[in-house]
Amino acid sequence: MIVESKDWKPKIVAFLCNWCSYAGADLAGTSRIQYPPTVRVIRVPCSGRINPFFILASLQHGVDGVLISGCHPGECHYLTGNYSARRKFVLLKSLLEHTGLEEGRIQFSWVSASEGVKFAKVIAEVTEKVKALGPAKKLVKSKT
């Protein structure tokens, strides 16, 4: 898909677990590691607590991409929350792609509290993938 303007920047919502991914984002910020300013962070207690309807609502409101990021497998503060999240979002991503949503609009990652550099790298990669897809058109509610 061709991007409508060279100045266009994607709007990405990132759901980050409080204990690992959000702490990794905080470390990236305090370490002054540069990453694209395209992401709006929503801090959640655990990636397993993210309701799939939050992702659908984000897409309906015109977000170009969604990132869900949690603790590495086996390191969840709530023991199995990240396993639950992985199952939920693999299924949701597959379902949405089956219905026509472009692959890459929804992405999942594992980032720990000590991985500020990895967090910045993930944000840069997600931004590039979503930018290549162009502005979201599917699932977006029209403003009438």
Image (tube, rainbow, N blue to C red):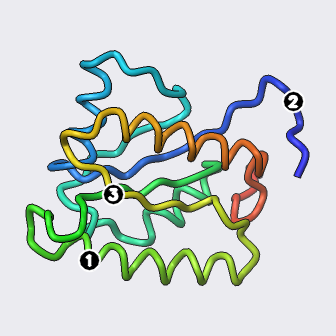
Label 1 vs 2, first from the N-terminus? 2
Residue appearing at x 23%, y 69% in the figure: 73
Query: Is residue 97 shown above or below 13?
Result: below
Mark 2 or mark 3: which comes first in sequence? 2
- The x and y percentages for residue 85 are 32, 73
Is residue 47 shown above or below 28? below
Which label number is shown at residue 110? Answer: 3
User: In x, y percent, where is residue 143?
Assistant: 74, 49
Kindly identify which numbered label has been placed on residue 5: 2
- The local crowd at label 1, few if under 14, some if 14 to 19, many if 20 or more residues have their Cα within 10 Å, is some
The image quarter containing residue 12 is: top right
Q: Residue at x 36, y 75 (%)?
A: 86
- Residue 33 in picture, x, y percent from top left: 38, 21
Query: Which numbered disc, 2 or 3, marks the residue closer to the eye?
Result: 3
Is residue 70 rendered to the left or right of residue 66? left
Q: Residues within 10 Å of mark 2 (few under 14, many from 20)?
A: few
Q: Pointer 1: what residue?
A: 83
Amino acid found under the numbered disc labelled 1: Tyr
